Image: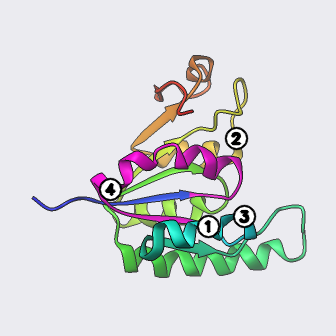
């Protein structure tokens, strides 16, 4: 039986740090990782070699350039989706996750979203967007089950 294709996706920073807590699972699958291209992530090129892809780093704080970067990342996400063709997408979010999860859902990929550890009582924007389309939505705090009643409490991934 061949291994499943699993795509792990997260924006740089805390979301990526959370996702990398799952790195012990990577070799159980035909895995790939997508994050943003920042200097702090260059070490990932050596560590994951042919299994890592980068999107353009963007932040909503840059009101003029962000929409263009997001649009470019949507097209790049479409290209990467068809290149990787994952059976599952596992993500801890933010803007790198939204487009590829929506693309994946359209084409039948299972979506597993892990709501960030940083939120205990409020929903994230990405969580709000991906909750309806996730096949498995995991929260790290029991209090978050009140906000996401169909979620699964998974505990902390740290």
Mark 3 or 2: in front is: 3
Marks 2 & 1, CB-CB < 8 Å contact? no
Give the residue at x 56% y 80%: 76
Q: Where is residue 30 in the image (x, y as percent from the top left)?
A: 30, 63
Asked if marks 1 and 3 touch (Cβ < 8 Å), the reply is: no
Query: Does the residue at mark 4 contact the one at mark 1 (Cβ under 8 Å)?
Result: no
Q: Are marks 3 and 2 in contact (CB under 8 Å)?
A: no
Q: How far apart are marks 3 and 2 (CA)?
A: 24 Å
- Circle 1 SS class: helix
Q: Residue at x 81, y 72 (%)?
A: 66
In the displayed image of the protein, which residue is found farthest to the left? 1
Answer few, some or many: residues within 10 Å of disc 3's Cα (few below 14, many 20 plus, some between 14 and 19).
few
Depth-wise, is mark 2 or mark 4 nearer the camera? 4
Viewer-side residue, 138 vs 39: 39
Q: How far apart are marks 4 and 3 (CA)?
A: 23 Å
Q: On the image, numbered disc 4 is attached to which residue?
A: 27
Local crowd at mark 1 within 10 Å, few (<14), some, or many (≥20)? few
Viewer-proximal residue among 10 and 100:
10
Q: Locate residue 149, reporting x and y percent.
A: 51, 24
Question: How packed is label 4: few (under 14 Cα within 10 Å), some, or many (20 or more)?
Answer: few
Q: Which of marks 2 and 4 is nearer the N terminus?
A: 4
- The tag earlier along the polypeptide, 4 or 1, is 4
Mark 2 vs 1, N-terminal side = 1
Give how far apart the Cα atoms at labels 2 and 1 are: 28 Å
Q: What element carries label 4?
A: helix
Residue range highlighted in magenta: 10-34
Badge 2: few (under 14), some or many (20 or more) residues near its Cα, within 10 Å?
Answer: some
In-image side of 19 versus 111 (left or right)? right
Which residue was labeled with disc 2?
Answer: 124
């Amino acid at each position: 039986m061949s291994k499943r294709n699993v795509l792990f996706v997260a924006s740089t920073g805390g979301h990526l740090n959370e996702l990398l807590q799952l790195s012990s699972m990577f070799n159980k699958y035909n895995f790939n990782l997508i994050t943003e291209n920042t200097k702090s992530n260059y070490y990932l090129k050596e560590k994951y070699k042919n299994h890592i892809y980068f999107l353009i780093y963007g932040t909503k704080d840059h009101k003029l350039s962000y929409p263009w970067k997001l649009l470019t990342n949507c097209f790049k996400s479409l290209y990467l989706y068809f290149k990787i063709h994952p059976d599952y997408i596992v993500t801890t979010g933010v803007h790198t996750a939204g487009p590829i999860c929506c693309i994946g859902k359209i084409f039948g990929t299972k979506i597993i979203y892990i709501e960030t550890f940083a939120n205990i009582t409020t929903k994230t924007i990405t969580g709000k967007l991906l909750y309806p389309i996730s096949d498995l939505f995991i929260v790290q705090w029991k209090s978050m089950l009140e906000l996401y009643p169909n979620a699964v409490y998974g505990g902390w991934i740290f």
